[in-house]
Image: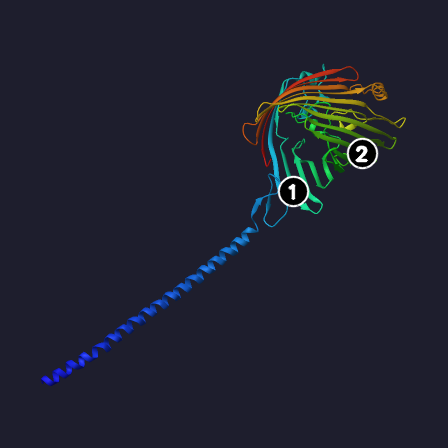
Amino acid sequence: MKKRILVGAVAAALSLPSFAADTKLDLLEKQIAELQKQIADLKTSQAAEAKQRQDLANQVEAQSKEVVMKGDIPGSTRRAGEETSVRLYGFARLDAVHNFGGRNNRSNGGDYAAYQPNIALNGTADAARKNETYMFANVSRLGFEAFTPTALGSLTTKVEGDFYTDSNTMRLRHAYGQVGGWLLGQTWSTFMDLDSSPDVVDFNGPTGNTSLRQPQIRYTYATAGAGNFIAALETKGTGKDSGDNISRTPDLVLRWDRAFDWGHIAVRGLTTDNAIKSDVTSAAKRGYGLGLGNSFKITDSTAFLTSFSYGEGMGRFFNESVGAIADSATSKVYLPRELGMVFSLQHKFSDTLRSTLAYGQQRTYNGNYVEYANQNGKGTLNRSIRSGSIGLLWNPVANIELGSEFMLSHRDTLDGQSGTEPRLNLAATYSFGN
């Protein structure tokens, strides 16, 4: 019995190392299995993350095609991958006018703004209708500009309109393309000198100024030291003539201008055709015009501007031209000989406040035109018109401008009648895209 117990004990002792070895092997196998599971889970997670990154990259790539970024021109934007920079701009404006004189606005064939050729003449029914107050927002404007680089230089395209019509519908102001020295489309006439036009509140500006936009083909030869040499062929902005008037040939306009440290100078000239064709009349006479404008910086904050325009049969190139007259009996055209001049003093009080004092005058001189008009019942045509104004413009914050201006205007006719118009114009302008 003791012998069997001893043998069993020895056998048990001999089996212990084998049992221990089996236990360690099972543990290692479990650890390996766990590591393999972790590796598999990691691969699955990495694959999911890689897919998420690819999906995100695809989204970014797709969205980047629609991204709008800052354009190459101040105030413009462009879409990624495109070369054209676009600028949308404009303003909403309200004018409030009190006319101390007689009736002279749209209700009487005049204008929203000051219109000296239609000032009510003393002794008339319109002259008795004094102290009219009205408001309008027709000056409000909307414009679009695009800039595209080309092998010939930057291509500029511009379309702009406002609502300065009787029906409050939009009218075209500018529509042109310009690349290099060439400009084709409708914009300010080449005969105009914008740099000598005063900064005023009234939409029409001072009497005696030249202010019109015309379809044209223009070329500018710019030099570094001798200024700009400009030539243009232009026609009426409406694209058609009224009544029996016709445009047989375009206007030819030449201008030279140059900027200096002290200001600028501009010399202008034009030739324009005055033709009438009807069942009984066929007549034509060529008109001409000459202009000189400049600005002089008295100080860094004060400038003196002048503009002179003189010619015969200049017609629409003046703000308030009396226009040509045709004699059907003799098939002869009579052209008015006119002089317009504008003087203005501009002062900048601060970065937000500025003021303008302006005087303008336009006169029709004696000649066969005046003689024919007086002999044929056209004595109410204007002999002279003039205006003086003082205005203040304030920008309390960016994109907001408040203006006030008092203007005193006078009108004299060929037959000796006259009229005077004092008016006060208040304006509020809210702009964007500038």
Q: Which residue is mark 1?
A: 146
Q: Position of residue 348 (x, y in %)?
A: 60, 24
- Would you say 8 lies left or right of 384 here? left
Circle 2 packing at 10 Å, graded few (<14), some (14-19), many (20+), is some
Residue contact at pointers 2 and 1, CB within 8 angstroms? no
Q: Position of residue 237 (x, y in %)?
A: 74, 34
Say which of 300 and 293 sits in front.
300
Say which amino acid is labelled 1. Ala
Q: Residue furthest right?
A: 330
Of the 4 image quadrants, the one containing the N terminus is: bottom left
- Would you say 244 lies left or right of 299 here? right
Which quadrant holds residue 135?
A: top right
Say which amino acid is labelled 2. Leu
Where residue 252 is drawn, which disc sits there? 2
Say which of 325 and 48 sits in front.
48
The residue that appears at 21% across and 77% down in the rendered structure is 16
Q: Position of residue 20 (x, y in %)?
A: 24, 74
Which quadrant holds residue 44?
A: bottom left
Say which of 177 and 94 sits in front.
177
Q: CA distance from mark 2 to mark 1?
A: 29 Å
- The relative height of residue 42 versus residue 252 in the rendered view (above or below) is below
- Dot 2 or dot 1: first in sequence order is 1
Q: Position of residue 158 (x, y in %)?
A: 67, 39
Circle 1 packing at 10 Å, graded few (<14), some (14-19), many (20+), is many
